[in-house]
């Protein structure tokens, strides 16, 4: 075979070398600061909650308050537990976003939760607009 046409086994070897192995991915994850991991997860939870509250472009097409409640409660737990670790500089905007989602949930609900019983309020306390 000529050098211009790669053989099949050379192609497979090349593809294997291009994809990172488990040890490489583990080292890459280890290089990410905890504050970045925590805030990234929080932003993903916020985005998913907003979609489930019907706040996305499609509006009510993806509205699911049961799912939104779970996501907001998980976000509240993460923000409450993580705040002392990540500091107020990073925690303050997460708390603001969490409160906005809690208020949006209250507004979207047909039957309002009692104060202190809304999503995440067992971690944050009652949320008042």
Image (cartoon, rainbow, N blue to C red):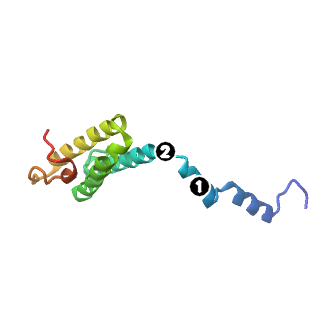
Compare marks 1 and 2 and give the one earlier in the sequence.
Answer: 1
Give left or right: position of 44 versus 118: right
Give left or right: position of 18 versus 117: right
Q: Which residue is tagged 1?
A: 25
What residue do we see at 45% from left, 43% from top?
36
Q: Residue 66 placed where, x, y %?
A: 23, 59
Q: Secondary structure at mark 2?
A: loop
Q: Are marks 1 and 2 in contact (CB under 8 Å)?
A: no
Name of the residue lying farthest toward the bottom: 9
Q: Residue 13 placed where, x, y %?
A: 75, 61
Q: Which residue is tagged 2?
A: 33
What residue do we see at 19% from left, 53% from top?
122
Q: Nearer the viewer, residue 129 or 37?
A: 37
What residue do we see at 38% from left, 42% from top?
86
What residue do we see at 90% from left, 62% from top?
1
Picture layout, residue 110 above or below residue 98:
below
As drawn, the label of residue 43 is none
């Amino acid at each position: 075979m000529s050098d211009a046409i790669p053989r099949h086994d050379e192609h497979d070897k090349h593809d294997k070398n291009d994809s990172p192995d488990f040890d490489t991915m583990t080292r890459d994850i280890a290089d990410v600061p905890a504050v970045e991991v925590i805030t990234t997860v929080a932003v993903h939870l916020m985005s998913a909650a907003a979609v489930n509250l019907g706040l996305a472009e499609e509006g009510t097409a993806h509205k699911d308050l049961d799912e939104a409640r779970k996501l907001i409660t998980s976000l509240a737990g993460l923000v409450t537990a993580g705040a002392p670790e990540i500091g107020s500089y990073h925690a303050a905007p997460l708390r603001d976003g969490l409160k906005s989602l809690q208020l949006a949930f209250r507004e979207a609900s047909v039957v309002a939760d009692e104060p202190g019983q809304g999503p995440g309020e067992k971690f944050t306390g009652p949320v008042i607009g």
